[in-house]
């Protein structure tokens, strides 16, 4: 089984919801680690938008498997510095047997995330490579 999810977010949407005036919104959507990571950059909003897109894409890919809330999904840097999805293991024990691959990209205006959920019968390295190729194709087409 393979299920995919994709989401595209406007970065300006997050800029309009500045962290300083909308902390409650950000704390509802993002984990403390994600907030710390995004805010470590001079311009945190492309990273917030990318992580939000990753959460949306993951929710879409997990359709009919699990129904996580935004804060149940965390985008972390993996051992190879690639972004990866981590779900709250206590709440989603039934999802632990699935592989979730993630690819993120952003331009000056948009952030896009692709996720693929597989049950282990698919080659996860091939899925990750395919997602990165898809993201680089989107990134290579300015104005879209």
Image (cartoon, grey):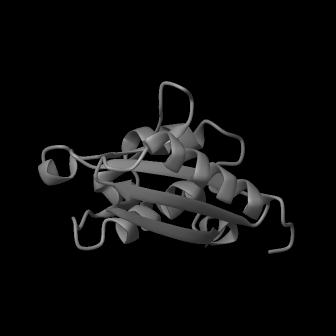
The image position of residue 56, as x and y in percent, is 44, 67
**In this rendering, is residue 103 above or below 66?**
above
Q: Indicate the quadrant where residue 143 lies.
A: bottom right
The image position of residue 106, as x and y in percent, is 70, 57
Q: In which quadrant of the rendered image does the C terminus lie?
A: bottom right
Q: Residue furthest top?
A: 79
**In this rendering, is residue 17 above or below 139?**
below
Q: Residue at x 38, y 47 (%)?
A: 74
- In the depicted view, which residue is nearer to us: 52 or 4? 4
Count of marks placed on residues? 0
**In this rendering, is residue 83 above or below 109?**
above
- In the depicted view, which residue is nearer to us: 139 or 10? 139
Residue 91 visible to the viewer: no
Q: Residue at x 56, y 36 (%)?
A: 82
Side of 131 where 117 appears, left or right: left
Side of 100 where 12 appears, left or right: right
Q: Indicate the quadrant where residue 61 lies.
A: bottom left
The image position of residue 4, as x and y in percent, is 44, 66
Q: Residue furthest right?
A: 142
Q: Indicate the quadrant where residue 72 lies.
A: bottom left
Side of 22 where 111 appears, left or right: right
Q: In which quadrant of the rendered image does the N terminus lie?
A: bottom left
Q: Residue at x 43, y 60 (%)?
A: 55
- In the depicted view, which residue is nearer to us: 118 or 92? 118
Residue 70 visible to the viewer: yes
Side of 88 where 135 appears, left or right: right
The image position of residue 111, as x and y in percent, is 65, 62
Q: Residue at x 57, y 44 (%)?
A: 38
């Amino acid at each position: 089984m393979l299920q995919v999810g994709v989401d595209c977010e406007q970065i300006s949407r997050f800029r309009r919801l500045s962290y300083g005036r909308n902390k409650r919104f950000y704390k509802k959507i993002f984990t403390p680690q994600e907030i710390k990571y995004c805010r470590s950059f001079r311009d945190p909003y492309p990273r917030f938008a990318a992580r939000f897109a990753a959460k949306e894409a993951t929710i879409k890919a997990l359709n009919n498997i699990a129904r996580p809330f935004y804060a149940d999904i965390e985008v972390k840097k993996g051992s190879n510095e690639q972004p990866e999805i981590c779900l709250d293991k206590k709440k989603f024990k039934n999802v632990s047997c699935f592989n979730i691959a993630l690819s993120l990209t952003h331009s000056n205006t948009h952030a896009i995330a692709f996720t693929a959920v597989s049950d282990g019968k698919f080659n996860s390295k091939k899925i990750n490579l395919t997602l990165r190729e898809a993201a680089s194709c989107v990134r290579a087409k300015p104005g879209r």
